[in-house]
Image (cartoon, grey):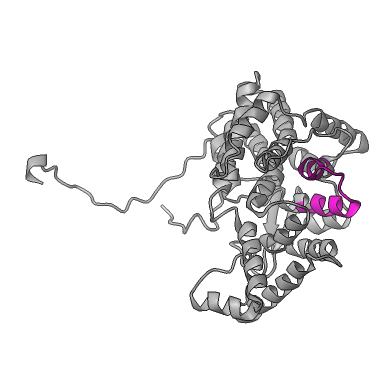
Amino acid sequence: MTETNGLKDAIACDTRISAIENDRLSYAGYDIAELMENNASFEEVIYLLWNLHLPTQIELNYFEKSLRKEYAISDAVEQCILIQSRRHLHPMSVLRSTVSLLGVYNVHAEENSLEALYEQSIQIMAKVPTIIATFARLRRGLVPIEPRSELGFAANFLYMLNGEEPSDLQIKAFNKALVLHADHELNASTFAARVTASTLTDLYSCVTTAIGTLKGSLHGGANERVFDMLLAIRESGDTERYLQKKLDSKEKIMGFGHRVYKTVDPRQEYLKEMARDLTFGTDDEVFYRLSEEVESFIKNKKGLIPNVDFYSATVYHVLGIDSDIFTLIFAMSRMAGWIAHVQEQRKNNKLLRPRSSYLGGRNLVYIPIGKR
C-alpha cells in the first residue's frame, strides 16, 4: 500500500464542484476572479455549486424565494439555543448541536430521495444564519431579531446580528466574503462530509460531521487568532518587535501559508480590498494598517503568503462580528460547499473506505495476567 503524509496529494474522489489548479480557485468551471469581478451574489454561487451552472433570472428568483421562506427557526429551536448560550460552551459546539437538532424537528429528515435531499439542503442553508445570529445575540443578553424575507442572504444576516439594516458597502463586503469561503475542493471538513455521505446516512449527520471537523484548531479558527494577534500588536505598539519575539520562540504566525497554495491564495486579495474599503476613515483603520505591516514583515522574514484567514479577520470585525464566532461565519458560508459535496456523493456513491498501514508488533504470544 502507498503511504501518504496526512493524505497529502492523494486523490480520494472525482468532483465537478470546485478545483484548485496552478494556485487558482474555481467553482464549477468559473474562476473565483470571474465571480468576484462580476459581483456574483452568494445565492447565485450556492445555486452554482449545487447545480453546476449559473441560474437564469427565473431560476434565481425561485431559488431565493425558497431560501427566504425557510429563514425562520421555531421557538423550540430558539429555546435550545438559549440553553446553549452559556459562556463556557464553544460556539462551534452550539452550531453542531443545533444543526443536528434541525433534523429532529424535520419529519422528513430520514427520507433519502434526491428531492428530499434538496428540500433538506434548502432548510439547512436558510436556517444556519438565523441560528448563528440568534446565538450571538442571546449570549449577550439581547433579544433575537426575526429574519426579513425581503432581504437577501448577506443583508438579512447582518440585520439579524446587529439590529439595523447594513449599508450597501457592508452587504457587498459580506457577500464577497461568503462567496470566497463557499467551497475549497477537498479540505478536511468537506472530506469528512463526503465520507459520512458515502455511508448513505442523512444530510443532517453529514453536515454535523463537517461542523465538528471545522471546529478543530488545525482547520477552523485561524482568523479568530489573527484578530487576537492584531489586538496584541496594537497594545504592544511595535509590530516588528512583537512578531520577531514570536518567531524567536518558534510560534506560528496565524493567517500565513497554505497546505495547497504555494505562491498566492487567490482569495486574500479580495478580502484585503474589502478590509481597506470598510476601515477607510474609521477608528478600525488601525487594524488594516497593522495587517499590512504584518504581511510585509512575514513576507520579508519567512517568504510566506497571507491566506484567506488573514484579512477576513478585519472584515468580520468591522461588520460587527465578535472574533470568537468568526468560525461560525466560515461554517455558514462553507455550508454551501458541504451540501454540494453531499449531493454529488449521493448521485454517484461508493463507500469511502481507505486502508491503514499497520506499524505495530506481530506474532506476539499471550502471557497470562498473573505472569505479566
Q: Residue at x 74, y 35 (%)?
A: 144
Asked whether residue 185 is in view, the answer is no
- Where is residue 52 shown, x and y percent of the image? 77, 41
Furthest residue in direction front, as rendered: 141
Instruction: Name which quarter of the figure residue 138 lies in.
Output: top right
Question: Which of 165 and 249 lies nearest the eye of the viewer?
Answer: 165
Position of 27 relative to 303 (above/below): above
Furthest residue in direction top, as rendered: 107
Q: Which residues are magenta?
A: 156-177
- Where is residue 88 shown, x and y percent of the image? 53, 45
Question: Which of 13 and 282 lies nearest the eye of the viewer?
Answer: 282
Whether residue 192 sits left or right of residue 47 in the image: it is: left
- Where is residue 105 shown, x and y percent of the image? 64, 22
Total number of numbered labels?
0
Whether residue 139 sits left or right of residue 251 in the image: it is: right
Question: Which of 93 and 196 lies nearest the eye of the viewer?
Answer: 93
- Where is residue 362 shown, x and y percent of the image? 22, 49
Instruction: Name which quarter of the figure residue 313 lies in.
Output: bottom right
Majority secondary structure of the magenta segment? helix
Residue 60 among those drawn in magenta = no
